[in-house]
Image (cartoon, rainbow, N blue to C red):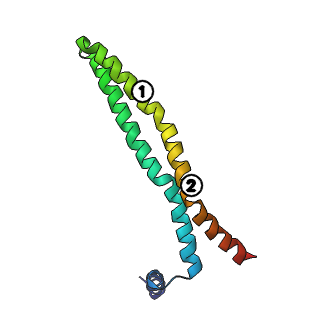
Amino acid sequence: MSKVNIAEEARSIAQKYQEKPEMVNKIELLRKLDQSVTKMPSVISLSVGIIGILIFGLGMCCWLVWSDMSVLGTVLCVVGAAVCIANYPLYSKMVAAKKEELAPQIIALSNEFASENN
């Protein structure tokens, strides 16, 4: 390694530990707030979707493998399909609720940036 590369690397490491300007901290907070609107609803929606598919798959097993359990298989398939169908409205409502909850903070931070740039 040359001395120039070592100096650049040392400078980049030192920047990680220096205090960041308030503007950088606020933009990071704004990004985190924006990501948090969809992050948890996505995790919950994915989990509910997986559970719905597993229930549906169990119903299909009852139908195809254990033919004497076809009534239970039909019920499980309907329940699994209903869970999967209900998943998107559930996601939409969670995102809307999270947006409503975080909107004042996000708008306030955004307005601070807009007023500082004018």
Q: Position of residue 13 (x, y in %)?
A: 43, 82
Task: Judge from the rendering whether residue 118 lies leftward or rightward of residue 40; answer left or right.
Answer: right
Q: Residue at x 46, y 87 (%)?
A: 7
Task: Judge from the rendering whether residue 21 lies leftward or rightward of residue 52; answer left or right.
Answer: right
Amino acid tagged 2: Lys
Q: Residue at x 34, y 20 (%)?
A: 75
Farthest residue in the right direction? Answer: 118
Residue 59 lies, with reference to residue 14, above or below; the image says above
Q: Which mark is residue 28?
A: none
Amino acid tagged 1: Ala
Q: Position of residue 54 (x, y in %)?
A: 33, 32
Q: Nearer the viewer, mark 2 or mark 1?
A: 2
Q: Which mark is residue 81?
A: 1
Q: Residue at x 39, y 22 (%)?
A: 78
Residue 45 lies, with reference to residue 59, above or below; the image says below
Q: Mark 1, residues whose alpha carbon is within 10 Å: few (<14), some, or many (≥20)?
A: some
Task: Judge from the rendering whether residue 76 lies leftward or rightward of residue 87; answer left or right.
Answer: left
Q: Mark 2, residues whose alpha carbon is within 10 Å: few (<14), some, or many (≥20)?
A: some
Of the numbered discs 2 and 1, the one sitting upstream in the chain is 1
Number of numbered discs on residues: 2
Circle 2 sits on which residue? 99
- Quadrant (top left/top right/bottom left/bottom right) for the N terminus: bottom left
Task: Judge from the rendering whether residue 115 lies leftward or rightward of residue 73; answer left or right.
Answer: right
Q: Residue at x 28, y 21 (%)?
A: 61
Instruction: Determine the secondary structure under disc 2.
Output: helix
Residue 51 lies, with reference to residue 116, above or below; the image says above
